[in-house]
């Protein structure tokens, strides 16, 4: 005697969408410093890599010269009482300077921040190519980090088929989706760091399928100890074959992820007595 049974599948889920990402391109900026009245105004400026500082003279003879001066240092405007001088900073760091004519009175510094590096992000669950029974409720998980010293990830937004499913602002970056209907879905995650740079993860494709009824066919005893059966399935979903001698206390004897819509299983420890078999579909992971 044989029995078949389909276990209750999984729950529900509504997914979201995909947006383009990538690092933001930064625009170079120019910061002005006034050189007059024996002062650099402002004396300290903070800029980014590839930004420019322009010193503008107001009628008094002075210089803007890095400390140390060239050739060890980076720039020297020469003696000026009018006009301007510019220097573009190609690396991060703290760059002091002074007026070589009045070094004890006139000093300043340029603080150049490191260029903002975009964050990294990847989807860690579900696996690419995973299959789930509809309706699907599950958790999309992502790993994200910011390589900049002191930097942080401020948001990870999840997308399915170009529709936002929601966002998470703190780790762990996990988002539960509910009641997802049958279909094919492309999942992506977009991470944003505290400098505004964004990165889009590699896409993960999943399938949500309508489960077929489980039907056991072609059952036959092959030998004293072997019994074979075939059952219908959905490729990619997980199933368990159970056996009982008395229609009670069924025990699992095989767990399988179906490779096709028809699975053949042979029980090599059937013994020579009567057994009952049933097949169930396991819940979504």
Image (cartoon, rainbow, N blue to C red):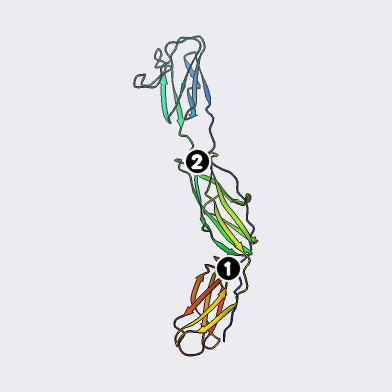
Vertical comparison of 90 with 3: above or below? above
In this view of the protein, which residue sits in the foreground, 45 or 129?
A: 129
Q: Residues within 10 Å of mark 1 (few under 14, many from 20)?
A: many
Give the SS element for disc 1.
loop
Q: Nearer the viewer, mark 2 or mark 1?
A: 1
Give the SS element for disc 2.
loop
In this view of the protein, which residue sits in the foreground, 71 or 22?
A: 22
Residue drawn where x is 49% and y is 28% of the image: 46
Residue drawn where x is 47% and y is 84% of the image: 222
Residue 17 in percent (x, y) is at 62, 50
Q: Residue furthest left?
A: 72
Q: Quadrant of residue 236?
A: bottom right
- Apparent side of residue 122 relative to residue 15 in the rendered image (left or right): left
Q: Quadrant of residue 137?
A: bottom right
Q: Where residue 234 is drawn, which disc sits there?
A: 1
In this view of the protein, which residue sits in the foreground, 148 or 3?
A: 3
Query: How many numbered discs sit on the rendered protein?
Result: 2
Residue 216 in percent (x, y) is at 58, 78
Q: Circle 2 is placed at which residue position?
A: 118
Vertical comparison of 174 with 278: above or below? above
- Could you give the CA–CA distance between mark 2 and mark 1, rounded to whole angstroms? 41 Å
């Amino acid at each position: 005697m044989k029995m078949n049974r389909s276990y209750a599948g999984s729950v529900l889920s509504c997914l979201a969408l995909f947006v383009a990402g990538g690092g933001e391109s930064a625009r170079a900026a120019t910061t002005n410093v006034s050189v007059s009245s024996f002062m650099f105004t402002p004396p300290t400026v903070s800029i980014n890599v590839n930004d420019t500082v322009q010193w503008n003279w107001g009628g008094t003879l002075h210089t803007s010269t890095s400390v140390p001066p060239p050739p060890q240092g980076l720039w020297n405007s020469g003696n000026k009482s009018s006009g301007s001088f510019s220097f573009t900073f190609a690396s991060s760091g703290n760059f002091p300077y002074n007026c070589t004519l009045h070094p004890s009175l006139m000093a300043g510094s340029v603080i150049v921040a490191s260029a903002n590096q975009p964050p990294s992000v990847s989807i860690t669950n579900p696996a690419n190519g995973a299959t789930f029974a509809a309706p699907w409720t599950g958790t999309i998980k992502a790993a994200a980090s910011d390589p900049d010293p002191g930097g942080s990830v401020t948001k990870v937004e999840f997308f399915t088929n170009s529709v936002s499913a929601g966002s998470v602002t703190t780790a762990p970056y996990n988002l539960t989706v509910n009641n997802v209907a049958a279909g094919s879905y492309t999942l992506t995650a977009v991470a944003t760091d505290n400098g505004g740079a964004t990165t889009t993860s590699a896409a993960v494709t999943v399938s949500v399928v309508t489960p077929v009824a489980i039907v056991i066919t072609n059952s036959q005893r092959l030998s004293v100890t072997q019994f074979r059966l075939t059952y219908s399935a959905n490729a990619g979903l997980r199933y368990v074959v159970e056996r009982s001698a008395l229609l009670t206390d069924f025990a699992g004897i095989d767990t399988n992820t179906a490779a096709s819509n028809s699975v053949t299983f042979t029980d090599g420890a059937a013994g020579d007595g009567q057994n009952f078999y049933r097949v169930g579909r396991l819940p979504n992971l």
